[in-house]
Amino acid sequence: RLNLAEKRLELANKTHLAVKGRVKAAAASDIQHTKVDIEQQAAEIEKTAALEIFDSSKARFERLLSGNVDELGFEYKPLLTVIDLPEKEDLLVAIQESPLALIAGLKRLQSKSRIDLARANAIPNPRLGLGVRRFNETNSNALIASISIPLPFFNRNQGNIASERAKSFKAEYEAEAAILSLKESAELIYAQILAASNAVKRYQDEIIPSALRAYNQASEGYGLGRFSFLELLDAQRTLYEMQEAHLNSLLQFHKAKAQVDFLMSAHAELIQQTISLK
């Protein structure tokens, strides 16, 4: 956003110079100079606001990392362009090992373990006894041991087994639903990142160069009296709008890329390192 604000100010300054030259030569009215003055001041205000937001965001980022961004060697330039995308098939495979998928799998295993425990409790434990008995008739003592095994005719823990089996079916369904939801999210995010990537490339390769040529032609033509002030101003605003649309597409791309990285656990090691620093 700061980069865009700097471009807008540079554009406003260039237009201001062109109009100023025409006004000086008495070939344009003062009102045109006033209008480009307003554009220039608005661009300066936007740059100041963008710089404040940049500094604030940088400070928050440094607090998150517990370090200085410059010392960590963080580069901003990669954020100004698109990068190579992973294959869609690789993304769909990777989500099987994502944290959400692993949690769903653990819940499934936990539920099955509870069924096994309920079945084990259906078999009662044997009871052992040990004691000493006195026989007065013979004036002697005897050591007595006993063992008894309750027969589970009436209580085989069927209620708990049925309950845990129902919970297991629910956990299985929820696990499958979680995986399906992850796949649907991955499909949607991949479509978004692909669309944003294509849009960024079109703005970079076609739209912005065309808008820049149109502005340069309008600026040169205005200086020669071939184009009107309104045509120059329109060309300037069109170029700025295309640059802003390009930035918005870049923002959409990197947001979608962050979601892809999360699904693929791309930065798990970095997250662990950051946590260990705190």
Image (tube, rainbow, N blue to C red):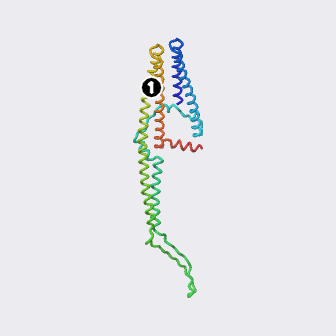
Instruction: Return the residue nearer the eye: 101 or 192.
Output: 192
The quadrant of the rendering that contains the C terminus is top right
- Picture coordinates of residue 45, whole percent (x, y): 57, 27
Instruction: Return the residue nearer the eye: 96 or 133.
Output: 96
- Picture coordinates of residue 52, whole percent (x, y): 58, 31
Instruction: Return the residue nearer the eye: 194 or 46.
Output: 46
Q: Quadrant of residue 188?
A: top left
Circle 1 — which element? Answer: helix
Q: Is residue 120 above or below residue 45?
A: below
Label 1 crowd (10 A; few <14 / some 14-19 / many >=20): many
Q: In this view, does 140 lie above or below 219?
A: below
Q: Is residue 50 above or below residue 116?
A: above
- Picture coordinates of residue 172, whole percent (x, y): 42, 54
Q: Which residue is drawn at 42% across and 32% down?
A: 199
- Picture coordinates of residue 225, whole percent (x, y): 46, 13
Which residue is label 1 attached to?
A: 208
